[in-house]
Image (cartoon, helix red, strand yellow):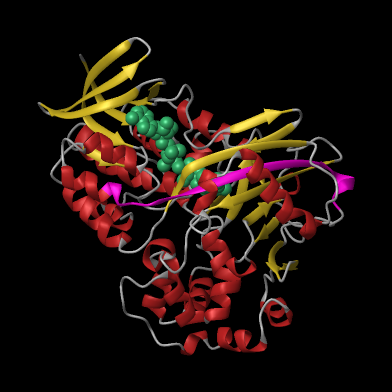
Amino acid sequence: MSDRDAIVIGGGVSGLSVAWWLGQAGVASEVWEQDGRLGGKIATREADGYVTERAASLMLNFRPEVSRMLTASGLDASRVMCPGPPANQRYLVQRGKLVPVPSRLGGLIRSPLWSLGGKLRLLAEPFAPRGGRPDESVSEFVSRRLGRELLEKAMEPYIGGPLASDPDLASAQAVLPRLVALERRYGSLAFGVFAHKVLNRRTAPVHEVFSFRRGMADLIDALASAPGVSFRTRHTVTQLEPARSGWRVTARTPEGERTFRASHIVLSVPAPRAATLLHSLDHELAQLLRGIEYAPVTVVHLAFDRAAVRHPLIGTGFLVPRTENAQLTGCQWVSNVFPNRAPLGKTLLACYLGGARAPETREWNDNRCIDAAIAGLAPLLGIDAAPEQVWVDRHDCALPLYHGAYSGRLRAIMERLKRWPGLQLAANYRGGISIRDRIGEAYALAQSMHVGLAPRGARWPVAGLPSLPICAAHRSSS
Ligand SMILES: Cc1cc2nc3c(=O)[nH]c(=O)nc-3n(C[C@H](O)[C@H](O)[C@H](O)COP(=O)(O)OP(=O)(O)OC[C@H]3O[C@@H](n4cnc5c(N)ncnc54)[C@H](O)[C@@H]3O)c2cc1C
Protein backbone atom coordinates (compact mmCIF):
# COMPACT_ATOMS: atom_id res chain seq x y z
CA MET A 1 0.00 0.00 0.00
CA SER A 2 1.45 3.38 -0.96
CA ASP A 3 0.51 6.92 0.06
CA ARG A 4 -1.00 9.79 -1.90
CA ASP A 5 -1.89 13.34 -0.86
CA ALA A 6 -5.26 13.37 -2.58
CA ILE A 7 -7.24 10.78 -4.51
CA VAL A 8 -10.17 12.00 -6.56
CA ILE A 9 -12.72 9.24 -7.18
CA GLY A 10 -14.56 9.81 -10.48
CA GLY A 11 -13.05 11.25 -13.65
CA GLY A 12 -16.03 13.36 -14.80
CA VAL A 13 -15.71 17.12 -15.17
CA SER A 14 -16.33 17.61 -11.41
CA GLY A 15 -13.46 15.36 -10.32
CA LEU A 16 -11.08 16.52 -13.06
CA SER A 17 -11.75 20.17 -12.17
CA VAL A 18 -10.85 19.61 -8.50
CA ALA A 19 -7.65 17.85 -9.59
CA TRP A 20 -6.88 20.70 -11.99
CA TRP A 21 -7.21 23.43 -9.33
CA LEU A 22 -5.20 21.38 -6.82
CA GLY A 23 -2.49 21.00 -9.46
CA GLN A 24 -2.42 24.78 -9.97
CA ALA A 25 -1.82 25.15 -6.24
CA GLY A 26 1.08 22.67 -6.35
CA VAL A 27 -0.86 19.77 -4.79
CA ALA A 28 -0.54 16.56 -6.84
CA SER A 29 -3.62 14.36 -6.98
CA GLU A 30 -4.58 11.12 -8.65
CA VAL A 31 -7.95 10.65 -10.36
CA TRP A 32 -9.41 7.13 -10.24
CA GLU A 33 -12.04 6.43 -12.86
CA GLN A 34 -13.98 3.20 -13.35
CA ASP A 35 -14.33 3.56 -17.15
CA GLY A 36 -11.57 3.18 -19.69
CA ARG A 37 -11.74 6.90 -20.50
CA LEU A 38 -12.11 10.21 -18.65
CA GLY A 39 -14.97 12.70 -18.94
CA GLY A 40 -17.86 10.84 -17.30
CA LYS A 41 -21.09 11.91 -18.99
CA ILE A 42 -19.18 14.23 -21.31
CA ALA A 43 -17.90 12.57 -24.48
CA THR A 44 -17.49 13.81 -28.04
CA ARG A 45 -18.09 11.41 -30.93
CA GLU A 46 -16.67 12.00 -34.43
CA ALA A 47 -18.17 9.87 -37.20
CA ASP A 48 -18.65 10.33 -40.97
CA GLY A 49 -17.92 14.06 -40.79
CA TYR A 50 -20.36 14.66 -37.91
CA VAL A 51 -19.43 15.72 -34.37
CA THR A 52 -21.97 14.78 -31.69
CA GLU A 53 -21.89 15.30 -27.94
CA ARG A 54 -23.09 12.56 -25.60
CA ALA A 55 -24.09 15.10 -22.91
CA ALA A 56 -22.95 18.74 -22.57
CA SER A 57 -22.60 20.50 -25.90
CA LEU A 58 -21.78 24.06 -24.81
CA MET A 59 -20.71 26.24 -21.90
CA LEU A 60 -22.40 29.42 -20.77
CA ASN A 61 -19.88 31.24 -18.62
CA PHE A 62 -19.78 34.36 -16.50
CA ARG A 63 -17.61 33.13 -13.61
CA PRO A 64 -14.13 34.72 -13.53
CA GLU A 65 -12.49 31.62 -12.06
CA VAL A 66 -13.76 29.58 -15.03
CA SER A 67 -12.35 32.13 -17.50
CA ARG A 68 -9.06 31.92 -15.60
CA MET A 69 -9.01 28.14 -15.89
CA LEU A 70 -9.72 28.26 -19.64
CA THR A 71 -6.91 30.77 -20.23
CA ALA A 72 -4.39 28.99 -18.01
CA SER A 73 -5.03 25.64 -19.67
CA GLY A 74 -4.59 27.07 -23.17
CA LEU A 75 -8.24 26.55 -24.09
CA ASP A 76 -8.89 30.14 -25.18
CA ALA A 77 -7.38 29.39 -28.57
CA SER A 78 -9.65 26.41 -29.05
CA ARG A 79 -12.87 28.19 -28.09
CA VAL A 80 -15.65 28.41 -30.70
CA MET A 81 -18.26 31.02 -29.86
CA CYS A 82 -21.98 30.62 -30.34
CA PRO A 83 -23.11 33.00 -33.12
CA GLY A 84 -24.57 36.44 -32.35
CA PRO A 85 -27.91 37.85 -33.58
CA PRO A 86 -29.85 36.93 -35.65
CA ALA A 87 -28.22 33.50 -35.84
CA ASN A 88 -28.66 32.98 -32.08
CA GLN A 89 -32.47 33.21 -32.26
CA ARG A 90 -34.22 30.71 -29.99
CA TYR A 91 -37.77 29.45 -30.34
CA LEU A 92 -40.56 28.12 -28.16
CA VAL A 93 -43.24 25.76 -29.40
CA GLN A 94 -46.73 27.21 -29.11
CA ARG A 95 -49.77 25.34 -30.40
CA GLY A 96 -47.57 23.16 -32.60
CA LYS A 97 -45.60 26.05 -34.19
CA LEU A 98 -42.16 27.56 -33.57
CA VAL A 99 -42.40 31.12 -32.22
CA PRO A 100 -39.23 33.27 -31.81
CA VAL A 101 -38.32 34.16 -28.21
CA PRO A 102 -37.91 37.95 -27.99
CA SER A 103 -34.64 39.20 -26.54
CA ARG A 104 -35.62 42.88 -26.11
CA LEU A 105 -38.46 44.67 -24.40
CA GLY A 106 -39.93 45.92 -27.69
CA GLY A 107 -40.00 42.40 -29.10
CA LEU A 108 -41.54 41.11 -25.89
CA ILE A 109 -44.40 43.59 -26.13
CA ARG A 110 -45.11 42.61 -29.77
CA SER A 111 -44.53 38.87 -29.29
CA PRO A 112 -47.51 36.53 -29.82
CA LEU A 113 -46.06 34.21 -27.16
CA TRP A 114 -47.87 35.94 -24.28
CA SER A 115 -51.37 37.38 -23.92
CA LEU A 116 -51.92 41.06 -23.10
CA GLY A 117 -52.78 40.04 -19.53
CA GLY A 118 -49.54 38.04 -19.29
CA LYS A 119 -47.48 41.01 -20.56
CA LEU A 120 -49.16 43.45 -18.14
CA ARG A 121 -48.51 41.00 -15.29
CA LEU A 122 -44.85 40.86 -16.31
CA LEU A 123 -44.58 44.66 -16.32
CA ALA A 124 -46.15 44.72 -12.83
CA GLU A 125 -43.26 42.63 -11.43
CA PRO A 126 -41.66 45.50 -9.44
CA PHE A 127 -44.91 45.86 -7.47
CA ALA A 128 -45.27 42.15 -6.59
CA PRO A 129 -44.78 41.58 -2.84
CA ARG A 130 -41.55 40.02 -1.59
CA GLY A 131 -41.75 36.31 -0.82
CA GLY A 132 -40.74 34.65 2.34
CA ARG A 133 -40.76 30.85 2.45
CA PRO A 134 -37.22 29.50 2.09
CA ASP A 135 -38.49 26.25 0.52
CA GLU A 136 -40.57 27.92 -2.20
CA SER A 137 -40.75 25.95 -5.47
CA VAL A 138 -39.73 27.45 -8.82
CA SER A 139 -43.42 27.56 -9.85
CA GLU A 140 -44.40 29.42 -6.69
CA PHE A 141 -41.52 31.89 -7.00
CA VAL A 142 -41.98 32.61 -10.73
CA SER A 143 -45.82 32.82 -10.57
CA ARG A 144 -45.62 35.16 -7.60
CA ARG A 145 -43.09 37.49 -9.24
CA LEU A 146 -43.81 37.21 -12.97
CA GLY A 147 -47.20 35.53 -13.31
CA ARG A 148 -48.43 32.06 -14.18
CA GLU A 149 -48.27 32.62 -17.94
CA LEU A 150 -44.57 33.45 -17.90
CA LEU A 151 -43.96 30.38 -15.77
CA GLU A 152 -45.70 28.03 -18.22
CA LYS A 153 -44.52 29.62 -21.46
CA ALA A 154 -40.96 30.69 -20.61
CA MET A 155 -39.57 29.28 -17.38
CA GLU A 156 -41.07 25.77 -17.41
CA PRO A 157 -39.56 24.84 -20.82
CA TYR A 158 -36.12 25.85 -19.53
CA ILE A 159 -36.51 24.01 -16.21
CA GLY A 160 -38.12 20.96 -17.87
CA GLY A 161 -35.65 20.89 -20.81
CA PRO A 162 -31.99 21.70 -20.11
CA LEU A 163 -32.40 21.08 -16.36
CA ALA A 164 -34.65 17.99 -16.85
CA SER A 165 -36.55 19.12 -13.77
CA ASP A 166 -40.13 19.91 -12.70
CA PRO A 167 -40.73 23.53 -11.63
CA ASP A 168 -43.58 22.47 -9.32
CA LEU A 169 -41.10 20.37 -7.31
CA ALA A 170 -37.77 22.12 -7.88
CA SER A 171 -36.46 24.39 -5.12
CA ALA A 172 -36.29 28.04 -6.30
CA GLN A 173 -33.33 28.70 -4.01
CA ALA A 174 -31.35 25.79 -5.50
CA VAL A 175 -32.31 26.19 -9.16
CA LEU A 176 -32.64 29.98 -9.51
CA PRO A 177 -30.22 31.24 -6.83
CA ARG A 178 -29.42 34.48 -8.66
CA LEU A 179 -33.06 35.48 -9.15
CA VAL A 180 -33.89 34.65 -5.53
CA ALA A 181 -30.92 36.76 -4.40
CA LEU A 182 -32.05 39.69 -6.59
CA GLU A 183 -35.48 39.63 -4.98
CA ARG A 184 -33.97 39.46 -1.51
CA ARG A 185 -31.61 42.35 -2.15
CA TYR A 186 -33.70 44.70 -4.28
CA GLY A 187 -37.28 43.56 -3.64
CA SER A 188 -37.78 43.12 -7.39
CA LEU A 189 -36.08 41.26 -10.24
CA ALA A 190 -36.51 44.22 -12.61
CA PHE A 191 -34.94 46.67 -10.12
CA GLY A 192 -32.21 44.15 -9.39
CA VAL A 193 -31.29 43.65 -13.05
CA PHE A 194 -31.40 47.43 -13.63
CA ALA A 195 -29.25 48.15 -10.55
CA HIS A 196 -26.70 45.54 -11.61
CA LYS A 197 -26.52 47.03 -15.10
CA VAL A 198 -25.97 50.56 -13.77
CA LEU A 199 -23.70 49.73 -10.83
CA ASN A 200 -21.61 47.09 -12.54
CA ARG A 201 -21.36 48.70 -15.96
CA ARG A 202 -17.56 48.37 -16.05
CA THR A 203 -17.01 45.34 -13.87
CA ALA A 204 -19.96 43.12 -14.84
CA PRO A 205 -18.81 39.72 -16.05
CA VAL A 206 -19.36 39.00 -19.72
CA HIS A 207 -21.75 36.15 -20.51
CA GLU A 208 -20.27 33.94 -23.19
CA VAL A 209 -21.65 30.82 -24.86
CA PHE A 210 -19.11 28.56 -26.49
CA SER A 211 -17.73 25.11 -27.17
CA PHE A 212 -14.29 24.06 -28.39
CA ARG A 213 -12.83 23.25 -31.79
CA ARG A 214 -12.98 19.47 -31.23
CA GLY A 215 -16.05 19.76 -29.00
CA MET A 216 -16.13 19.14 -25.26
CA ALA A 217 -13.35 16.55 -25.66
CA ASP A 218 -10.92 19.51 -25.76
CA LEU A 219 -12.00 20.57 -22.27
CA ILE A 220 -11.61 17.07 -20.81
CA ASP A 221 -8.19 16.63 -22.45
CA ALA A 222 -6.99 20.00 -21.12
CA LEU A 223 -8.16 19.25 -17.57
CA ALA A 224 -6.56 15.81 -17.58
CA SER A 225 -3.20 16.88 -19.02
CA ALA A 226 -2.50 19.68 -16.54
CA PRO A 227 0.57 19.59 -14.27
CA GLY A 228 -0.07 17.75 -11.01
CA VAL A 229 -2.95 15.67 -12.40
CA SER A 230 -2.39 11.97 -12.92
CA PHE A 231 -5.09 9.41 -13.49
CA ARG A 232 -5.85 5.72 -13.42
CA THR A 233 -8.68 4.48 -15.61
CA ARG A 234 -10.42 1.10 -15.06
CA HIS A 235 -10.13 1.66 -11.32
CA THR A 236 -13.54 1.05 -9.75
CA VAL A 237 -13.47 2.11 -6.12
CA THR A 238 -15.19 -0.51 -3.99
CA GLN A 239 -14.28 0.51 -0.46
CA LEU A 240 -13.43 3.60 1.57
CA GLU A 241 -12.19 3.32 5.15
CA PRO A 242 -10.74 5.86 7.55
CA ALA A 243 -7.11 5.11 8.26
CA ARG A 244 -4.42 6.65 10.43
CA SER A 245 -4.19 10.33 9.36
CA GLY A 246 -6.26 9.80 6.26
CA TRP A 247 -8.16 7.24 4.22
CA ARG A 248 -7.68 3.80 2.76
CA VAL A 249 -9.16 3.38 -0.74
CA THR A 250 -9.63 0.01 -2.41
CA ALA A 251 -10.35 -0.37 -6.11
CA ARG A 252 -11.02 -3.19 -8.54
CA THR A 253 -8.50 -2.85 -11.38
CA PRO A 254 -7.43 -4.99 -14.39
CA GLU A 255 -4.43 -6.05 -12.25
CA GLY A 256 -6.68 -7.17 -9.38
CA GLU A 257 -7.63 -5.40 -6.18
CA ARG A 258 -5.43 -2.45 -5.15
CA THR A 259 -5.38 -0.39 -1.97
CA PHE A 260 -3.82 3.03 -1.43
CA ARG A 261 -3.74 5.46 1.43
CA ALA A 262 -4.44 9.18 0.93
CA SER A 263 -4.76 12.06 3.34
CA HIS A 264 -7.68 13.54 1.33
CA ILE A 265 -10.42 11.89 -0.68
CA VAL A 266 -12.72 13.71 -3.09
CA LEU A 267 -15.77 11.64 -3.96
CA SER A 268 -16.84 12.91 -7.41
CA VAL A 269 -19.38 10.26 -8.33
CA PRO A 270 -23.19 10.50 -8.66
CA ALA A 271 -25.07 10.57 -5.34
CA PRO A 272 -26.41 6.96 -5.46
CA ARG A 273 -22.87 5.70 -6.06
CA ALA A 274 -21.50 7.86 -3.22
CA ALA A 275 -24.26 6.42 -1.00
CA THR A 276 -23.18 2.84 -1.81
CA LEU A 277 -19.54 3.62 -1.02
CA LEU A 278 -20.39 5.34 2.26
CA HIS A 279 -23.10 2.95 3.45
CA SER A 280 -21.01 0.87 5.82
CA LEU A 281 -19.19 3.95 7.12
CA ASP A 282 -22.09 6.29 7.82
CA HIS A 283 -25.57 4.93 7.28
CA GLU A 284 -27.25 8.31 7.81
CA LEU A 285 -25.03 10.12 5.30
CA ALA A 286 -25.66 7.35 2.77
CA GLN A 287 -29.43 7.64 3.29
CA LEU A 288 -29.32 11.40 2.73
CA LEU A 289 -27.37 10.94 -0.50
CA ARG A 290 -29.66 8.14 -1.68
CA GLY A 291 -32.63 10.51 -1.32
CA ILE A 292 -31.36 12.76 -4.15
CA GLU A 293 -33.49 11.93 -7.19
CA TYR A 294 -32.20 11.75 -10.77
CA ALA A 295 -34.05 12.07 -14.08
CA PRO A 296 -33.26 10.23 -17.32
CA VAL A 297 -32.42 12.04 -20.55
CA THR A 298 -32.04 10.52 -24.01
CA VAL A 299 -30.33 12.47 -26.78
CA VAL A 300 -31.30 11.46 -30.33
CA HIS A 301 -28.92 12.96 -32.90
CA LEU A 302 -30.49 13.12 -36.37
CA ALA A 303 -28.61 14.04 -39.56
CA PHE A 304 -30.56 15.16 -42.66
CA ASP A 305 -29.73 16.47 -46.04
CA ARG A 306 -30.23 20.26 -45.68
CA ALA A 307 -32.68 20.20 -48.60
CA ALA A 308 -34.90 17.77 -46.68
CA VAL A 309 -35.61 20.40 -43.97
CA ARG A 310 -38.04 23.08 -45.19
CA HIS A 311 -37.68 25.39 -42.15
CA PRO A 312 -35.04 28.14 -42.75
CA LEU A 313 -33.34 27.15 -39.46
CA ILE A 314 -32.17 30.67 -38.58
CA GLY A 315 -31.32 30.19 -34.92
CA THR A 316 -30.00 27.70 -32.42
CA GLY A 317 -33.03 25.55 -31.62
CA PHE A 318 -36.20 25.35 -29.59
CA LEU A 319 -37.69 24.30 -26.26
CA VAL A 320 -41.10 22.69 -25.77
CA PRO A 321 -43.37 23.73 -22.88
CA ARG A 322 -45.16 20.93 -21.00
CA THR A 323 -48.50 22.41 -22.08
CA GLU A 324 -47.77 21.12 -25.61
CA ASN A 325 -47.93 17.52 -24.34
CA ALA A 326 -45.00 16.64 -26.60
CA GLN A 327 -42.45 13.94 -25.89
CA LEU A 328 -39.58 16.15 -27.03
CA THR A 329 -38.33 18.65 -24.44
CA GLY A 330 -36.14 20.51 -26.92
CA CYS A 331 -33.89 20.42 -29.95
CA GLN A 332 -30.53 22.02 -30.65
CA TRP A 333 -29.73 22.88 -34.27
CA VAL A 334 -26.17 21.74 -33.78
CA SER A 335 -24.81 22.47 -37.26
CA ASN A 336 -26.07 26.08 -36.94
CA VAL A 337 -24.59 26.65 -33.50
CA PHE A 338 -20.98 25.66 -34.17
CA PRO A 339 -19.04 25.24 -37.45
CA ASN A 340 -17.74 21.89 -38.67
CA ARG A 341 -20.28 19.76 -36.81
CA ALA A 342 -21.75 18.35 -40.04
CA PRO A 343 -20.51 17.91 -43.63
CA LEU A 344 -21.38 20.69 -46.09
CA GLY A 345 -25.03 20.52 -47.19
CA LYS A 346 -26.10 18.43 -44.17
CA THR A 347 -27.98 19.39 -41.01
CA LEU A 348 -27.35 17.91 -37.58
CA LEU A 349 -30.10 18.18 -34.94
CA ALA A 350 -29.86 16.98 -31.31
CA CYS A 351 -33.29 16.10 -29.85
CA TYR A 352 -33.81 15.71 -26.10
CA LEU A 353 -36.39 13.37 -24.53
CA GLY A 354 -37.22 12.49 -20.93
CA GLY A 355 -36.40 14.49 -17.82
CA ALA A 356 -38.71 14.62 -14.81
CA ARG A 357 -41.53 15.27 -17.27
CA ALA A 358 -41.23 11.86 -18.95
CA PRO A 359 -39.32 9.42 -16.72
CA GLU A 360 -41.01 6.54 -18.59
CA THR A 361 -38.55 7.12 -21.48
CA ARG A 362 -36.03 5.24 -19.30
CA GLU A 363 -37.87 2.04 -20.28
CA TRP A 364 -38.08 2.82 -24.02
CA ASN A 365 -35.79 1.10 -26.48
CA ASP A 366 -33.69 3.14 -28.94
CA ASN A 367 -36.17 2.73 -31.82
CA ARG A 368 -39.01 4.14 -29.76
CA CYS A 369 -36.86 7.14 -28.78
CA ILE A 370 -35.90 7.73 -32.44
CA ASP A 371 -39.55 7.50 -33.56
CA ALA A 372 -40.65 9.95 -30.84
CA ALA A 373 -37.90 12.41 -31.80
CA ILE A 374 -38.78 12.30 -35.50
CA ALA A 375 -42.52 12.52 -34.80
CA GLY A 376 -41.96 15.65 -32.69
CA LEU A 377 -39.54 17.27 -35.10
CA ALA A 378 -41.03 16.59 -38.53
CA PRO A 379 -44.13 18.85 -38.33
CA LEU A 380 -42.21 21.69 -36.66
CA LEU A 381 -39.38 21.80 -39.18
CA GLY A 382 -41.19 20.53 -42.26
CA ILE A 383 -39.22 17.32 -42.69
CA ASP A 384 -40.58 14.54 -44.93
CA ALA A 385 -37.43 12.48 -45.50
CA ALA A 386 -35.93 9.89 -43.17
CA PRO A 387 -32.70 10.87 -41.38
CA GLU A 388 -29.50 9.84 -43.13
CA GLN A 389 -27.71 9.08 -39.84
CA VAL A 390 -28.90 8.53 -36.26
CA TRP A 391 -27.04 8.21 -32.96
CA VAL A 392 -28.71 7.68 -29.58
CA ASP A 393 -27.14 8.56 -26.23
CA ARG A 394 -28.95 7.39 -23.12
CA HIS A 395 -28.45 8.57 -19.56
CA ASP A 396 -30.67 6.69 -17.10
CA CYS A 397 -29.54 8.96 -14.26
CA ALA A 398 -28.74 12.03 -16.34
CA LEU A 399 -29.19 14.90 -13.94
CA PRO A 400 -29.90 15.32 -10.23
CA LEU A 401 -33.21 16.99 -9.44
CA TYR A 402 -32.97 19.81 -6.93
CA HIS A 403 -36.48 18.88 -5.79
CA GLY A 404 -38.44 19.33 -2.59
CA ALA A 405 -36.48 19.92 0.59
CA TYR A 406 -33.26 19.83 -1.42
CA SER A 407 -31.54 22.69 0.40
CA GLY A 408 -32.29 21.12 3.80
CA ARG A 409 -31.00 17.75 2.58
CA LEU A 410 -27.76 19.34 1.32
CA ARG A 411 -27.27 21.17 4.61
CA ALA A 412 -27.75 17.88 6.47
CA ILE A 413 -25.25 16.17 4.16
CA MET A 414 -22.63 18.87 4.71
CA GLU A 415 -23.21 18.78 8.47
CA ARG A 416 -22.81 14.99 8.54
CA LEU A 417 -19.68 15.20 6.39
CA LYS A 418 -17.94 17.19 9.14
CA ARG A 419 -17.58 13.87 11.03
CA TRP A 420 -15.20 12.65 8.33
CA PRO A 421 -12.19 14.97 8.08
CA GLY A 422 -10.37 14.63 4.77
CA LEU A 423 -13.46 13.41 2.90
CA GLN A 424 -15.05 15.78 0.36
CA LEU A 425 -18.03 15.50 -1.98
CA ALA A 426 -17.86 17.21 -5.38
CA ALA A 427 -20.36 16.32 -8.08
CA ASN A 428 -23.27 17.89 -9.91
CA TYR A 429 -25.80 17.23 -7.12
CA ARG A 430 -24.03 19.98 -5.19
CA GLY A 431 -23.64 23.55 -6.42
CA GLY A 432 -25.10 23.34 -9.94
CA ILE A 433 -25.18 20.95 -12.86
CA SER A 434 -23.50 23.11 -15.52
CA ILE A 435 -19.87 22.72 -16.47
CA ARG A 436 -19.37 26.34 -15.41
CA ASP A 437 -20.59 25.55 -11.91
CA ARG A 438 -18.62 22.31 -11.74
CA ILE A 439 -15.36 24.18 -12.49
CA GLY A 440 -16.27 27.10 -10.22
CA GLU A 441 -17.27 24.89 -7.27
CA ALA A 442 -14.09 22.86 -7.73
CA TYR A 443 -12.11 26.09 -7.34
CA ALA A 444 -13.72 26.75 -3.95
CA LEU A 445 -13.22 23.15 -2.81
CA ALA A 446 -9.60 22.98 -3.92
CA GLN A 447 -8.91 26.21 -2.05
CA SER A 448 -10.33 24.76 1.17
CA MET A 449 -8.33 21.53 0.69
CA HIS A 450 -5.18 23.52 0.00
CA VAL A 451 -5.29 24.76 3.60
CA GLY A 452 -4.79 21.19 4.85
CA LEU A 453 -2.45 19.96 2.13
CA ALA A 454 -0.02 22.80 1.45
CA PRO A 455 2.86 23.65 3.82
CA ARG A 456 1.83 25.76 6.81
CA GLY A 457 1.40 29.42 5.94
CA ALA A 458 1.35 28.76 2.17
CA ARG A 459 -1.05 31.12 0.44
CA TRP A 460 -3.62 30.15 -2.14
CA PRO A 461 -1.47 30.80 -5.15
CA VAL A 462 -3.87 31.16 -8.04
CA ALA A 463 -2.80 34.41 -9.66
CA GLY A 464 -5.43 36.94 -10.62
CA LEU A 465 -8.16 35.51 -8.41
CA PRO A 466 -9.02 36.65 -4.91
CA SER A 467 -9.13 34.02 -2.17
CA LEU A 468 -12.66 33.09 -1.21
CA PRO A 469 -13.66 33.06 2.45
CA ILE A 470 -13.52 29.29 2.69
CA CYS A 471 -16.60 28.62 4.78
CA ALA A 472 -18.67 30.97 2.66
CA ALA A 473 -17.49 29.24 -0.48
CA HIS A 474 -18.76 25.97 0.88
CA ARG A 475 -22.00 27.38 2.10
CA SER A 476 -22.74 28.90 -1.30
CA SER A 477 -22.49 25.53 -2.93
CA SER A 478 -24.88 23.81 -0.60
C1 LIG B 1 -27.86 15.11 -21.89
C2 LIG B 1 -27.11 16.14 -21.11
C3 LIG B 1 -26.82 17.38 -21.67
C4 LIG B 1 -26.12 18.34 -20.94
N1 LIG B 1 -25.81 19.54 -21.53
C5 LIG B 1 -25.06 20.45 -20.86
C6 LIG B 1 -24.60 21.63 -21.51
O1 LIG B 1 -24.85 21.85 -22.70
N2 LIG B 1 -23.84 22.51 -20.80
C7 LIG B 1 -23.50 22.28 -19.49
O2 LIG B 1 -22.82 23.12 -18.88
N3 LIG B 1 -23.88 21.14 -18.85
C8 LIG B 1 -24.64 20.22 -19.51
N4 LIG B 1 -24.99 19.04 -18.89
C9 LIG B 1 -24.58 18.81 -17.50
C10 LIG B 1 -23.14 18.29 -17.35
O3 LIG B 1 -22.75 17.57 -18.50
C11 LIG B 1 -23.07 17.35 -16.13
O4 LIG B 1 -23.66 17.96 -14.99
C12 LIG B 1 -21.61 17.02 -15.79
O5 LIG B 1 -20.96 16.50 -16.91
C13 LIG B 1 -21.57 16.02 -14.62
O6 LIG B 1 -20.23 15.83 -14.27
P1 LIG B 1 -19.83 15.03 -12.94
O7 LIG B 1 -18.37 14.90 -12.96
O8 LIG B 1 -20.47 15.65 -11.75
O9 LIG B 1 -20.52 13.58 -13.09
P2 LIG B 1 -20.20 12.41 -14.14
O10 LIG B 1 -19.93 12.95 -15.48
O11 LIG B 1 -21.34 11.44 -13.98
O12 LIG B 1 -18.85 11.75 -13.59
C14 LIG B 1 -18.81 10.82 -12.54
C15 LIG B 1 -17.69 9.84 -12.84
O13 LIG B 1 -17.53 8.96 -11.73
C16 LIG B 1 -17.20 7.67 -12.24
N5 LIG B 1 -17.47 6.68 -11.18
C17 LIG B 1 -18.67 6.34 -10.66
N6 LIG B 1 -18.49 5.42 -9.68
C18 LIG B 1 -17.16 5.19 -9.59
C19 LIG B 1 -16.36 4.35 -8.75
N7 LIG B 1 -16.90 3.56 -7.82
N8 LIG B 1 -15.01 4.36 -8.93
C20 LIG B 1 -14.44 5.16 -9.87
N9 LIG B 1 -15.16 5.98 -10.69
C21 LIG B 1 -16.50 5.99 -10.54
C22 LIG B 1 -18.11 7.56 -13.47
O14 LIG B 1 -17.67 6.54 -14.34
C23 LIG B 1 -17.97 8.96 -14.05
O15 LIG B 1 -16.90 9.06 -14.95
C24 LIG B 1 -25.70 18.06 -19.61
C25 LIG B 1 -25.98 16.80 -19.04
C26 LIG B 1 -26.67 15.85 -19.77
C27 LIG B 1 -26.93 14.50 -19.15
Residue 127 higher or lower than 380, as above or below: below
In the current view of this chain or complex, which residue is farthest to the right?
Answer: 307
Give me the residue at 51% from left, 51% from top. Answer: 360
In the current view of this chain or complex, which residue is farthest to the top?
Answer: 255
In the current view of this chain or complex, which residue is farthest to the left?
Answer: 244
Magenta span includes 235:
no
Can residue 360 be seen at all in this image of the molecule?
A: yes
Residue 379 higher or lower than 270, as above or below: below
Q: Nearer the viewer, residue 158 or 222?
A: 158
Q: Nearer the viewer, residue 333 or 79?
A: 333
Magenta span includes 300:
yes
Can residue 191 be seen at all in this image of the molecule?
A: no
Q: Is residue 292 left or right of residue 54?
A: left
Quarter of the picture containing the N terminus is top left
Give me the residue at 79% from left, 59% from top. Answer: 379
Quarter of the picture containing the C terminus is bottom left
Q: Is residue 333 left or right of residue 474?
A: right
Q: Position of residue 297 (x, y in %)?
A: 53, 47
Q: Position of residue 245 (x, y in %)?
A: 11, 28
- Give the image quarter of residue 393: top right
Q: Nearer the viewer, residue 220 or 49?
A: 49
Magenta residues (range)? 289-309
Give me the residue at 36% from left, 81% from top. Answer: 131
The number of numbered discs placed on residues in the rendered structure image is 0
Q: Position of residue 281 (x, y in %)?
A: 16, 36
Q: Position of residue 106 (x, y in %)?
A: 71, 80
Q: Is residue 348 left or right of residue 27?
A: right
